Image (spheres, helix red, strand yellow):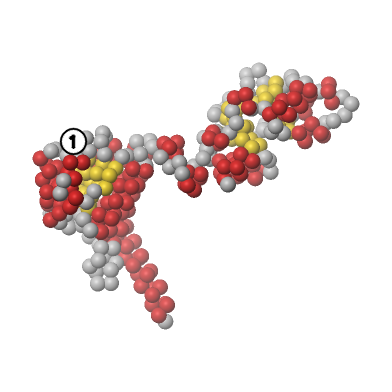
Amino acid sequence: MKNRSTIKDGKLVIDTELVGIKKLYKSIDNDFDKAVKLLSKVKGRVIITGVGKSGHIASKISSTMSSTGTPSQYCTPTDMSHGDLGIISKKDALIIISNSGNSNELSNLLKFTAKNSVSVIGITANSKSELMKYASITLLIPSASEACSIGLAPTTSTTMALVLGDALCVALMKLKKFNMSAYKKIHPGGALGLSMLQVKDIMHTKNKIPLVTQEASMKSVIIEMTKKSFGHVGVRNKQNHLIGIITDGDLRRHLNNKFFKLKASDIMTIRPILINQNLLMSDALQIMNKNKITFLFAVNNFSKKSPVGVIHIHDCIRHAN
């Protein structure tokens, strides 16, 4: 019975917070659009702050914003009142999170931003608060019951603030066209960095690509295949378009008395499977596993089919380990 009661309590918390998130969803309006556009034009940093639990939410939002292409910094209002106001310049913008909007710790900060013409985005649940008066743009948190059993501890309200912060960050990164390549540059390490490896990051390029012309002799095919050590060669036409592929298996299957009279085009497999160089390494592995192959030519444009690189399954395994 105790276990069932605990599970029920846990689900009740989630249900209560979901009600708040649904209200938040309906509250997104033109002020949200204005806030995102303001942030996209910031030449300096987006400084995010809050008091108490809101401070923890502010720290997380700041971290997410920095990792998605907008330089951001978290600082407490108390620290700013004791000298750290010096981190704020007119090129910056502030996001201030406060459920009540009337925290004493915010007073000096709000006066400073007004005096120095610093843009402020306020996130609050109190439409009549001091934060509301000073903010350039206000994003109101809808009134919703806290999930706390006595209805006092910040739970639903902080969840809504966090979700709103995520919405700002994602909408901002889309507006600024912050893409995978840019994201990868600031996330080079760990499992996340590995998961973002693209084909172009590990493929073999230029003179390492095993290629022959469609008129190439079998001798030339064997020499190129041996020299590049992939067990494959691509066959290209006069326009440098890839029109076929020859594997070491193809060579063995065509061994006969007339073998050395054949041309590359005589034994190649037409319409080879290609991969765009901008796809992820994991995509390459999936394609190779699905088609039971160990090698892919990479292209930049599927319509022209000009090879820009090659990737072998061993390349993927080596980088994954």
221 sits to left or right of 279: right
Say if 183 sits above or below 9 in the image: above
Residue projecting furthest to the front = 83
Percent across and percent down for residue 143 are 22, 60
**Can residue 135 be seen in this snapshot?**
no
Of 227 and 300, nearer the camera is: 227
Quadrant where the image shows the N terminus: bottom left
Of 76 and 286, nearer the camera is: 76
Of 40 and 22, nearer the camera is: 40
Which residue shows up at 24% across the image and 69% down it?
A: 151
Say if 138 sits above or below 257 in the image: below
Percent across and percent down for residue 131 are 15, 50
**Amino acid type for the residue under numbered disc 1:** Lys
**Can residue 159 be seen in this snapshot?**
yes
Identify the image quadrant of residue 161.
Answer: bottom left
Say if 250 sits above or below 58 in the image: above
Residue projecting furthest to the top = 238
264 sits to left or right of 280: right
**Which residue is label 1 attached to?**
90
